[in-house]
Amino acid sequence: MIKYRRMPDLVMLVVTLALLAIGLLMVYSASAVKAASEFGDSLYFLKRQLLFAGVGLILMFAVMRIDYHFWRSWANLGLAACYGLLVLVLIPGVGLARGGARSWLGIGAFSIQPSEFVKVALILFLASYLSEHQSRLPFFRKGLVPSLLPVILAFGLIMLQPDLGTGMVLVLTCVLMIFIAGARIRHFVLLGFAGTVGFAGLIISAPYRLKRLTGFLNPWQDPKDSGFQITQSLLAIGPGGLLGFGLGQSRQKYQYLPEPQTDFIFSIVSEELGFIGASFVLILFCLLLWRGVLIAIKAPDLFGSLLAVGITGMIAIQIMINIAVVTGLIPVTGITLPFLSYGGSSLTLMLVSIGILLNVSNQVHS
């Protein structure tokens, strides 16, 4: 029996709004100095993030009211459109290059990152495909391989930009969905070995990635070059102590820590709000993921369950990678922290994804 709730998962909704509010506050705090020096307006990044948040919230509440089964009929077309955008972004003069990667498309005064859209499109496509062909998954050729082909194509296009961090999130999210859907463990062991070899090849083939790896292994050996980002991040987190320096009192945002409002915003959170503030943010993330897992378990059908697994997994993987980077546990990858980091495409798509999850939560097993 399926029971329809009058309200979506209120815990997830409240936690999402709380994380968004903290994110807006920290984007302003982390970016005010940089915005004032580069654009003559300390509110520059906050104004844009408020716009993205407003659009994202409108879309989230709209999507929350649309039956999630509606997206199933658009899954193929949506993924094809995203592939088109990934190809378009590679064309010189069309795609915009930032930080060494051609990952953006300019739209007036703003820009979008197609790789963010393809993550959600692939989740929708795989949830639909796997729920229809679950019986084939135990078989390598007619089950697992067809499931992986669209993932490999998307990963290849993203690596042409190149953007290894986003590619990692995409692949890990999709592999999680395929595994939960019923693929055999032994197949993943073989794929894991092949993936490890391929990953090592990607690092060796690009000098800047190899430099990041050596900088990660011993950042203090070259703190002004290859180890600069990690050492500056740790110099923000460590001195924050238990209570932090206070909101707005970060020292590292004064041109020391690169991009404090995006990839390394958690470092500023730790510096200004201390261990207690950083722990509070992590607790909110854990609550969000916990509710996502419950929604996946209670979803009325396999499509809804896999959809919830994919969205929750994507958020969890991005959180883990970002926190691991800023704390020096893995090399720098360029992954933003969901809901907190500055970025229009990422924030908007995250809020839309939460809207889909909230709709799934309206339809649970009694």
Image: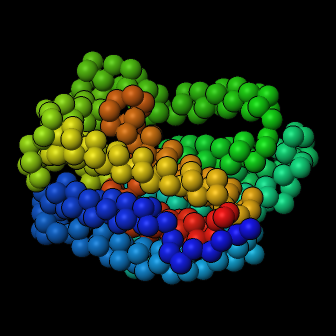
Q: Quadrant of residue 231?
A: top left
Occupied quadrant, residue 118: bottom right
Q: Is residue 242 left or right of residue 184?
A: left
Question: In the image, is 279 to the left or to the right of 294?
Answer: left
Is any atom of residue 150 visible in this view? yes
- Residue 298, image x and y in percent? 64, 58
Q: Is residue 278 left or right of residue 299?
A: left
Q: Is residue 68 above or below residue 260?
A: below
How many tags in the picture? 0
- Figure quadrant of the C terminus: bottom right
The quadrant of the rendering that contains the N terminus is bottom right
Q: Position of residue 236 (x, y in %)?
A: 19, 37
Q: Nearer the viewer, residue 159 or 135?
A: 135
- What residue do we see at 45% from left, 40% from top? 321
> Residue 50 at x, y = what percent?
29, 73
The quadrant in which residue 229 appears is top left
Image location of residue 196, percent across then percent down? 64, 27
- Which coloring applies here? rainbow
Residue at 15% over, 60% down: 32
Judge whether 185 appears above or below 314 on screen.
Answer: above
> For this rendering, which residue is in front, 175 or 194?
175
Q: Is residue 67 above or below residue 309?
A: below
Residue in view at x 87 percent, y 40 percent = 138
**Whether residue 163 is visible:** no
Viewer-nearest residue: 215 or 10: 10
Residue at image position (84%, 60%) is 132
From this view, report whether residue 55 is shown above or below residue 203.
below
